[in-house]
Structure formats: structure tokens, C-alpha cells
């Protein structure tokens, strides 16, 4: 096993030296394709939001860039190969951001959030983006506010579908957030979104769908990982990234029935790290703590924390 350092860089001319320990394997994560296009779906997400009249903040963009590092490390470093107990990896991330001081003040909460979610032991450090990438998020191109009054995760599962239906039935105009990953899930997202657009044709609700995946072999001589325990951090980050462009005091709705949110053991083998923590109340509370420390005027909320899936469906 090895300890791993994943460090982000803004293009080939970004050559800052990052100190590392003798027992750390260093991987360079390139964030830019071509001259100035952000890679890994980040630039596409900015373009998609701009077309919807949504202009996220720089710190909202930072959060998505942090999530890209988390997702890369989570999916491209094998637990079986790179941990002493076949589960707990030792990871360090160094992320280029717009305001390192702001992020460093929130680093403890961020690390606590990630360790609880993934079961790993990690640290996150920050450095300033290179000068030509100091400002990336485009300023609003219109005086009119965005057309959306809610942000809600839309995974392709039943719970998120119910969340969308409940918002639309109440006359809200949500921006739905999807991460395009595994094929069957992505197909379900698109099929369900299409049906919603047909049924609620009078509403101007829409969707941000972002594809983010990293090539096998990103980390040299290390196999990929299939558990994707950190994926919900990317999912939440996408929602907050979009929400930061809706104005002040937004709510990111995370529709999940309370039984799964509490991750009670569904059978004798699903204990501790073997059970999902993607919407656990402790995890979501850490997210709200993190947003407060970063100065992002929003919060995450599970409106179905006290409902079973059956009660959600019946309603």
C-alpha cells in the first residue's frame, strides 16, 4: 500500500512545486483541456448554467473543483491494493482555488465530512489558482433573476423522482441536478426527465446534467475502485455550485427516504462502512457547517427525513 497525493493543476504552464513525503505517490490532476477550457465536465457545467441564465460564484466553482479531486481519488485508487485493511486509504489532496485563506479556514470541517462519508483518512490543502485562472465564473449577463426557485438532486431513482414531482405539483420551478455516470442510471435520468417535461409542459423547470469520469490508469500502476463512496460529495457539490447562482439563501433539496438516510443495517452484513452514508443526518449537518464557513448563503435539506419510501410513494 501507499499514501497518495492528488494535486490539481491548471494547464502545462502551472508548474508550482508541491512538497511531498517519501512514502507518498504523487498524481497530477490536469484541470484544463487545450488553452483555457476546464476539463472533466466542469467547463461544460458552466456553459450549461449560463444558457439557463444561472451564474455561479467563484467559491461555488471552487467547490466543484474540490469535488473533482475527491471523485478522482475515490474512483481511481483501489481500496484493496492501497490500504492496510482493504478499505481505509490514506489520501491527501491539494486543490487550486480562488481564495485559499477562506478554504483553509474550512479545511477541518471538509476533512471531517469526507472521512465520515468515505471511511478514508484524508487531508485537504489549498493553493491559489494561477493568475490567468484567478477569475473563471462569468458575471451575470442579465439584470433578470434566474427562472428557478428551487434546486433538487435528480439521480434517476424513485425518491428523487418523487421530490421533483412534489415540487412541480406545488407550483415551484426547480433546477434538477444530475450526475451522468453509469449507463443505466444515466438512461433512467433522461427518460424520467423527458416524461416530466411532457407532463408539466407549462413549467419552465430544467436540468443541469454533468458528466464527470476519469480514465483508468490516472494513478500510475494502481487499479481503479468500484465502490464510489465519495460520489455523493460530487452530487451535493454540483447542486451547491448551481445554487450559488440563484441568489441568496437557496436550499438544495436532497430527496431520500429516512430509513436509507439513517443507513440502518438492512441485513447482518451491512454494518459501518459497508452501508451508505450519502444522506446521513450527520453528513448533511457537516455540509451545512461547511457552507457557513465558506460564506455560501445556502443549505442542504432532506425534506423526507421522517418518511419511509412507502410513505413517500403513497403521498
Image (spheres, helix red, strand yellow):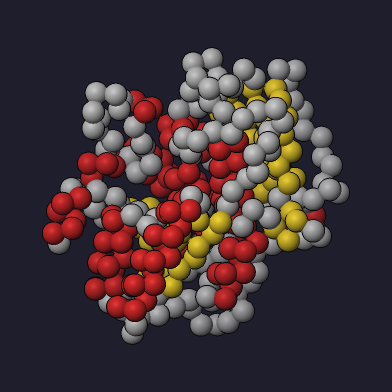
Point 29% across, 73% down: residue: 168
Figure quadrant of residue 175: bottom left
Residue extending furthest bottom? 202
Q: Depth check: 8 or 57 in front? A: 8
- Image x and y of residue 86, in percent: 50, 19
The N terminus: image quadrant: top right
Point 43% across, 53% down: residue: 184
- Image x and y of residue 82, in percent: 59, 22
- Image x and y of residue 51, in percent: 57, 76
Camera sees residue 134: no
- Image x and y of residue 107, in percent: 56, 37
Residue extending furthest top? 84
Figure quadrant of residue 113: top left
Point 75% across, 56% down: residue: 33
Q: Depth check: 124 or 229 in front? A: 229
Q: Depth check: 75 or 175 in front? A: 75
The correct choice, above or below, for 84 with respect to 308 in the image is: above
Taking the image as shown, residue 214 lies to the left or right of residue 15, namely left
Figure quadrant of residue 274: top left
Query: How many tags in the picture?
Result: 0
The C terminus: image quadrant: bottom left
Q: Depth check: 1 or 121 in front? A: 1
The correct choice, above or below, for 215 with respect to 111 in the image is: below
Camera sees residue 64: yes
The correct choice, above or below, for 78 with respect to 2 in the image is: below
Point 84% across, 42% down: residue: 15
Amino acid at each position: 500500500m501507499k499514501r497518495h497525493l492528488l494535486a490539481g493543476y491548471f494547464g502545462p504552464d502551472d508548474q508550482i512545486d508541491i512538497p511531498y513525503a517519501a512514502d507518498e505517490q504523487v498524481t497530477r490532476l490536469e484541470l484544463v483541456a487545450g488553452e483555457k477550457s476546464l476539463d472533466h465536465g466542469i467547463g461544460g457545467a458552466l456553459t450549461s448554467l449560463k444558457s439557463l441564465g444561472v451564474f455561479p460564484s467563484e467559491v461555488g466553482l471552487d467547490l466543484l473543483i474540490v469535488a473533482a479531486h475527491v471523485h478522482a481519488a475515490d474512483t481511481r485508487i483501489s481500496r484493496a491494493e492501497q490500504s492496510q485493511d482493504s478499505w481505509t486509504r490514506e489520501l491527501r489532496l491539494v486543490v487550486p482555488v480562488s481564495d485559499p485563506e477562506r478554504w483553509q479556514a474550512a479545511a477541518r470541517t471538509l476533512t471531517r465530512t469526507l472521512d465520515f462519508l468515505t471511511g478514508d483518512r484524508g487531508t485537504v490543502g489549498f493553493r491559489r489558482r494561477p493568475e490567468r485562472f484567478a477569475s473563471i465564473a462569468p458575471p451575470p449577463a442579465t439584470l433578470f433573476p434566474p427562472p428557478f426557485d428551487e434546486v433538487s438532486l435528480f439521480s434517476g431513482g424513485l425518491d428523487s423522482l418523487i421530490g421533483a414531482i412534489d415540487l412541480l405539483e406545488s407550483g415551484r420551478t426547480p433546477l434538477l441536478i444530475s450526475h451522468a455516470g453509469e449507463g443505466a442510471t444515466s438512461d433512467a435520468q433522461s427518460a424520467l426527465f423527458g416524461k416530466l417535461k411532457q407532463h408539466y409542459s407549462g413549467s419552465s423547470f430544467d436540468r443541469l446534467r454533468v458528466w464527470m469520469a476519469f480514465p483508468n490508469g490516472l494513478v500510475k500502476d494502481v487499479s481503479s475502485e468500484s465502490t464510489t463512496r465519495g460520489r455523493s460529495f460530487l452530487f451535493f457539490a454540483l447542486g451547491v455550485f448551481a445554487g450559488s447562482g440563484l441568489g441568496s439563501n437557496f436550499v438544495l433539496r436532497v430527496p431520500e427516504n429516512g430509513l436509507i438516510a439513517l443507513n440502518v443495517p438492512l441485513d447482518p452484513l451491512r454494518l459501518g462502512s459497508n452501508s451508505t452514508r450519502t444522506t446521513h443526518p450527520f453528513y448533511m449537518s457537516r455540509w451545512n457547517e461547511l457552507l457557513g464557513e465558506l460564506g455560501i448563503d445556502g443549505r442542504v435539506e432532506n425534506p423526507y427525513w421522517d418518511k419511509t419510501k412507502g410513505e413517500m410513494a403513497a403521498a
